Image: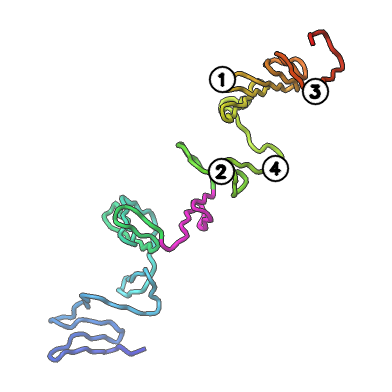
Amino acid sequence: MADLSNLKIKDTYQLLLQADASGNVQNLQGATPNPFIVNGNLRYVDGNQQADYYLKSDGTGNATWAQLTVSGDIYISAATMNDTVLQLHTTSGTTINVPVSYWSTDGSGNYSNSGLTGNVGIGTSTPGEKLTVEGNISASGDGYFNNVGIGTDSPGHTLEVKGPESTLARFYDSSNGSIGQIEIGTMDIKVNSNKMQFRDADNTPILTITDDEYVGIGTTTPNEKLTVVGAISATTDLYFNTINGGTF
């Protein structure tokens, strides 16, 4: 390394700069030494310089390259995007410039990602999808999706549920856990009072199954394994163990 002690820079008429034995440079123009002022570009190379570092001074004026670190709270009043720099405007009136070279703006409020994967992670720094959330999600509005997979990340249907043989899904009223209903096209399946009913578009029960294994067609109160209110038509034989009255 070059020895800067007692280095002197002169023009034709007078001494301009001088470095003392400690390497401190002083501007010697004028009656007394003045601070060294550079009006223009200054390059300081000490081997520690890196992109987006800044020169940090200690109490004696010695400068070193350092990263921007913050301790304590910062209160942000607004933020703007200036080309590839995110500007955070604090309540104290200062502006913190954060280089974000992967994001750019077209000046109309539209932002694009030109260097990252384009994935967004909440609770994770390595999102594998356009949006990856590690944790619970709470929403008060509507959500719109194409295919939804529960227990699978590659659903082939509008709703696909995959899991063990135990209960895969449960549908029930928020105020009464014994009531549930699923609409399928113009019909629905409803469970209430220990009965499952298949109902038409007018909510009229077509078939009723009770929890004591009775099935009713045309009735909501079957009292036998199969109770039919109405005529029965068959194209093949019917077999009975016992016939108690009735018309055939």
The mark closer to the camera, 3 or 4, is 3
Residue occupied by mark 3:
236
Question: Left or right: 134 with respect to 54?
Answer: right
Who comes first in sequence, dot 1 or dot 2? 2
Q: Which residue is drawn at the image coordinates 46% and 57% (left, top)?
A: 118
Who comes first in sequence, dot 3 or dot 2? 2
Q: Which mark is residue 115?
A: none
- Viewer-closest of 53 and 145: 145
Q: Which residue is drawn at the image coordinates 68% and 16% (left, top)?
A: 218
Residue occupied by mark 4:
164
Looking at the image, residue 66 lies above or below residue 19 = above
Residue 31 is a magenta residue: no
Q: Which mark is residue 202?
A: 1
- Viewer-closest of 146 and 125: 146
Residue 33: x and y in percent read 18, 80
Q: Which residue is drawn at the image coordinates 12% and 90% (left, top)?
A: 13
Who comes first in sequence, dot 4 or dot 2? 2
Residue 64: x and y in percent read 36, 74
Boundaries of the magenta span: 114-134
Q: Amino acid at mark 3?
A: Thr
- SS assignment at label 2: strand
Image quadrant where residue 67 sits: bottom left
The mark closer to the camera, 1 or 2, is 1
Who comes first in sequence, dot 1 or dot 4? 4
- Viewer-closest of 214 and 238: 238
- SS assignment at label 1: loop
Q: CA distance from mark 1 to mark 4?
A: 36 Å
